[in-house]
């Protein structure tokens, strides 16, 4: 029982971590309708920034968020404006996928050129210390990530639901042409959304860097898991991404213990495939019937 | 080529074609001759690697390019081939046999993996292939007894042709080059045959392809199976060449992306593009690895990524696209055909002979959620009859068409057709309907955008003909009849709305259907053409074809129809001969509102 509770706690903490990465991705995927394969590399860039700022200036890694979030916002906005926007009308959606794959490849290898293949450990300022809650032990940093993920989800949800900009974003996602007719500048909305999506991951990277060693390929693992979560939670659904992340975190922790740690990923991706094939709208997504439209 | 003198511009096209073939032969010859001439180990290695990647990329292109299924998991098949080869070699079986064993396993894996994924489109298909790749990698790591796990597998040092392992480099180059030729040959053969047309048509417009009788699932599965088999065979050889394999480098996402990238940069969906992409890019990697060594780690990947972004931004059709634009700089002089209109048809004035029923529709019901779109629709179509289906927007006309061509299954009721065998059939999907001789057009035109007008019509003609030359001939004949003769070699996209409507009809006419379903083919074309189209339809009917036409152009409906059915809110509210129906108060009410009913 003790072990089981500990596994559940680990799973939830992992889920919080996944959530903070996946929220930005679902925003971009659901609203700009672009599969951003470079999302993991945004995380990687953010973590290196945190690493550099923390070890260079000697500030607490969490404090670097003040700089990392705006930088990542700009990175995301520039990506949309210069790379994705010219391709929005491409006849073939593969083109956009290749564009983000190209960006991802370029960023990974740029990091390799600059930092080499060695891992970079961000000073952790005590966030790796264990705390005891009841009978389970977790890292202090994990708890902060979990709480931050909840805050981020609520904040984004309020932003999308209550502000005019948020409404404009949702309108653009639902029907771009109609949104344009209502005077919404769709291009600006896309740039903004991409920026916010990247900024979310920037927020995450300041929290994640002190717990995980940074390496050029750290993003690849996270982005694949994040895609699993985004599809599981339903495209563009922020609460969906949060709960999807918790589910995947739990599945990862439980299968790691009960099935074998080397088969964890096979279980996660197996679930992903089942969801993708049987219920592509995800667990929390709504299905829009298009059957009455000409096939 | 079966280009005949039909087209005065044909000689220049053939000339360019020949030029292209010469250039291609030179590239291939250079791939083999340069390393042999230089004789340097490292140069040999680079050219062997080029051949391997070009072969993999060419194989990928059959799925990713022709079929348009963006696979980012192709390393699955390459890895299966590699592992099958190495495992069997360790058991004392030659890789020449292992190669085919690997290919067989890969084909099975490909069919099992792809079949459920075909319903996924665009990015979801790509994500699913990545997920499968991850699963394969994890499983390869897990089953250590078979695969050696993370430590990998070595091949025993047995040298000779039998084992594909050599002291010198030349034999390896010969094998790699041979594999490249095989892959290019297969890719070329597919592209220039019926299967290639079917694949491209499926990629461009799946539903239009299905309406033209293409079994879209089957052709894709064939493409995936062929592609997987070729990839696996290359994988077996590459494993022998590398002498060591491990899951991380065999089932690698990076490798899958590279394979796809070469095709994209060279020209996705073209036969020779992947070769060009690999020829240009592989040397960069190998130079960066071999010559610059550790200090430049990441440099080649960085260059790859940047090149990829630049290519998608500035030359999305790849090198082949640029070459094609360069080659066709001078637009072909028009003027082989004066006609831009539908050829006038002389028709006999003999009264139409309407025969026995060929299509029975009984009690069709269809709901979309709470919306009752089709309510108890029943009618019969007789041989040689033209049936006009009219009704206000939203009446459910197109839904009825979708059920008459297999795109929608009715909730209740049945559609039965008289086959050429004299028996009644109840077909279930668009393919069965097409096989029984039902051809349809789409209200929103569905041209195969990446194909020329001629190729578009050929897709329809392939319903009857198996060889390209027969289909081409039939397509040309149909095109001339439909007034599309002068546009034969233009891209379908360049046609006007009226032209696209005619193309839509031409494609279905090339199928020689027995029952023709026309969905608003006259909307948006000019008056003269409407008149010609009416004549054309009457002449089609005289050959015994039965027609159901959804039409808003009343002048045409009146002139054409033997019988008119009026749908409103999913129900038949009136039917009869055209003169009766237009005077029916229910019909006037449905179209114009209650206050006009008495007028």
Image (cartoon, coloured by chain):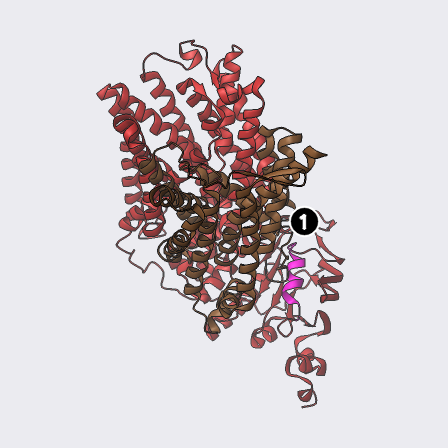
| Quarter of the figure with residue A11 | top right
> Residue at coordinates 49% horizontally, 74% vertically from top-left?
A182
Side of B376 relative to B404 (left or right): right
> Residue at coordinates 29% horizontally, 22% vertically from top-left?
B44
Side of B306 relative to B516 (left or right): left
> Residue at coordinates 56% horizontally, 66% vertically from top-left?
A161
Farthest residue to the left: give it.
Answer: B38
Q: Nearer the viewer, residue B588 or B345?
A: B588
Q: Position of residue B576 (x, y in %)?
A: 71, 74
Q: Regarding mark 1 in the picture, which secondary structure is present there? A: loop
Q: Nearer the viewer, residue B125 or A167?
A: A167
Q: Position of residue A289 (x, y in %)?
A: 64, 59
Q: Nearer the viewer, residue A251 or B7?
A: A251
- Would you say the magenta stretch is mainly helix, strand or loop? helix
Relative height, residue B7 to residue B24 (above, below): below
What subunit carries mark 1? B
Q: Quadrant of the C terminus of chain B?
A: bottom right
Q: Position of residue B523 (x, y in %)?
A: 52, 70
Q: Position of residue B63 (x, y in %)?
A: 48, 39
Among the chains, which one is brown?
Answer: A
**Magenta segment includes B399:** yes
Q: Residues within 10 Å of mark 1 (few under 14, many from 20)?
A: few
Q: Quadrant of the N terminus of chain B?
A: top left
Relative height, residue B230 to residue A277 (above, below): above
Q: Nearer the viewer, residue A241 or B509?
A: A241
The span shown in magenta is B395-407
- Colour representing chain B: red
Residue at the spot of label 1: B420
């Amino acid at each position: 029982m003790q072990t089981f509770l500990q596994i559940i706690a680990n799973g939830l903490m992992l889920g919080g971590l996944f959530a903070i990465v996946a929220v930005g991705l679902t925003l971009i995927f659901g609203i700009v309708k672009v599969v951003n394969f470079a999302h993991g590399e945004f995380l990687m860039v953010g973590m290196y920034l945190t690493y550099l700022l923390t070890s260079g200036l000697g500030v607490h890694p969490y404090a670097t968020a003040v700089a990392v979030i705006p930088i990542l916002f700009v990175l995301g906005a520039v990506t949309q404006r210069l790379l994705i926007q010219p391709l929005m009308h491409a006849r073939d959606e593969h083109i956009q996928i290749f564009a983000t794959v190209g960006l991802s490849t370029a960023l990974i290898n740029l990091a390799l050129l600059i930092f080499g293949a060695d891992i970079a450990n961000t000073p952790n300022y005590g966030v790796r210390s264990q705390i005891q809650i009841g009978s389970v032990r977790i890292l202090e940093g994990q708890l902060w990530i979990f709480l931050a993920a909840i805050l981020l989800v609520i904040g984004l949800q309020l932003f999308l639901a209550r502000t005019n900009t948020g409404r404009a974003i949702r309108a653009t996602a639902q029907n771009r042409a109609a949104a344009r007719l209502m005077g919404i500048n769709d291009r600006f909305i896309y740039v903004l959304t991409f920026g916010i999506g990247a900024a979310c991951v920037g927020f995450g990277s300041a929290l994640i860097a002190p717990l995980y060693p940074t390496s050029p390929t750290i993003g690849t693992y996270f982005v694949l898991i994040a895609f699993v979560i985004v599809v599981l939670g339903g495209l563009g659904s922020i609460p969906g991404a949060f709960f999807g992340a918790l589910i995947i975190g739990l599945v990862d922790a439980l299968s790691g213990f009960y099935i074998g740690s080397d088969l964890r990923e096979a279980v996660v991706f197996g679930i992903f495939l089942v969801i993708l094939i049987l219920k592509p709208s995800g667990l929390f997504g709504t299905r829009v019937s298009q059957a009455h439209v000409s096939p | 080529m079966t280009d005949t003198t039909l087209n005065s511009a044909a000689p220049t096209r053939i000339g360019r074609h020949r030029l292209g073939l010469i250039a291609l032969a030179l590239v291939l010859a250079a791939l083999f001759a340069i390393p042999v001439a230089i004789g340097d180990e490292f140069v040999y290695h680079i050219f062997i690697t080029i051949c391997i990647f070009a072969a993999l990329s060419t194989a990928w292109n059959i799925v990713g390019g022709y079929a348009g299924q963006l696979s980012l998991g192709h390393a699955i098949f390459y890895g299966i081939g590699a592992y099958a080869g190495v495992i069997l070699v360790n058991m004392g079986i030659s890789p020449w046999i292992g190669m085919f064993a690997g290919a067989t396993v890969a084909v099975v894996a490909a069919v099992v993996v792809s079949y459920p994924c075909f319903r996924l489109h665009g990015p979801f298909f790509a994500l699913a292939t990545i997920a499968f790749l991850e699963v394969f990698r994890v499983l390869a790591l897990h089953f250590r007894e078979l695969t050696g796990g993370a430590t990998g597998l070595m091949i025993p040092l047995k040298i000779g042709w039998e084992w594909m392992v050599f002291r010198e480099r030349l034999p390896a180059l010969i094998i790699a080059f041979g594999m490249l030729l095989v892959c290019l040959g297969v890719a070329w053969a597919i592209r220039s045959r019926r299967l290639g047309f079917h694949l491209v048509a499926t990629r461009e417009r799946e539903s239009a392809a299905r309406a033209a009788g293409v079994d879209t699932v089957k052709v894709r599965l064939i493409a995936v199976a062929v592609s997987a088999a070729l990839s696996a065979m290359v994988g077996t050889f590459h494993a022998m060449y590398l002498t060591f394999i491990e899951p991380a480098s065999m089932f690698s996402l990076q490798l899958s992306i590279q394979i796809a990238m070469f095709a994209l940069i060279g020209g996705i969906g073209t036969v020779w593009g992947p070769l060009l992409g690999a020829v240009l890019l592989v040397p960069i990697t190998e130079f960066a690895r071999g010559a610059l060594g550790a200090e430049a780690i990441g440099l080649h990947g960085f260059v790859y990524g940047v090149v990829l972004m630049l290519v998608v931004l500035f030359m999305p059709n790849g090198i082949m696209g640029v070459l094609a634009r360069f080659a066709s700089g001078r637009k072909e002089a028009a003027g082989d055909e004066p006609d831009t209109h539908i050829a006038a048809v002389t028709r006999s004035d003999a009264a139409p002979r309407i025969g026995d029923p060929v299509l029975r529709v009984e009690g069709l019901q269809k709901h979309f959620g709470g919306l009752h779109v089709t309510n108890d629709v029943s009618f019969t179509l007789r041989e040689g009859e033209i049936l006009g289906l009219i009704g206000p927007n939203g009446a459910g006309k197109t839904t009825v068409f979708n059920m008459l061509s297999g795109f929608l299954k009715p909730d209740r009721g049945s559609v039965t057709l008289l086959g050429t065998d004299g028996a009644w059939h109840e077909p279930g999907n668009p393919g069965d309907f097409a096989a029984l001789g039902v051809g349809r057009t789409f209200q929103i035109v569905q041209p195969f955008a990446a194909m020329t007008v001629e190729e578009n019509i050929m897709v329809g003609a392939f319903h009857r003909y198996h060889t390209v030359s027969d289909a081409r001939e039939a397509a040309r004949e149909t095109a001339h009849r439909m007034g599309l003769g002068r546009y034969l070699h233009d891209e379908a996209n360049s046609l006007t709305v009226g032209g696209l409507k005619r193309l839509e009809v031409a494609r279905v006419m090339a199928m020689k259907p027995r029952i023709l379903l026309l969905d608003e083919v006259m909307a948006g074309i000019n008056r003269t053409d409407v008149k010609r189209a009416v004549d054309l339809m009457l002449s089609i009917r005289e050959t015994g074809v039965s027609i159901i036409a959804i039409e808003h152009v009343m002048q045409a409906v009146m002139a054409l129809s033997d019988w008119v059915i009026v749908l409103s809110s999913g129900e038949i509210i009136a039917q009869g001969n055209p003169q009766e129906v237009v005077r029916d108060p229910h019909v006037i009410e449905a179209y114009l509102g209650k206050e006009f009913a008495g007028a």
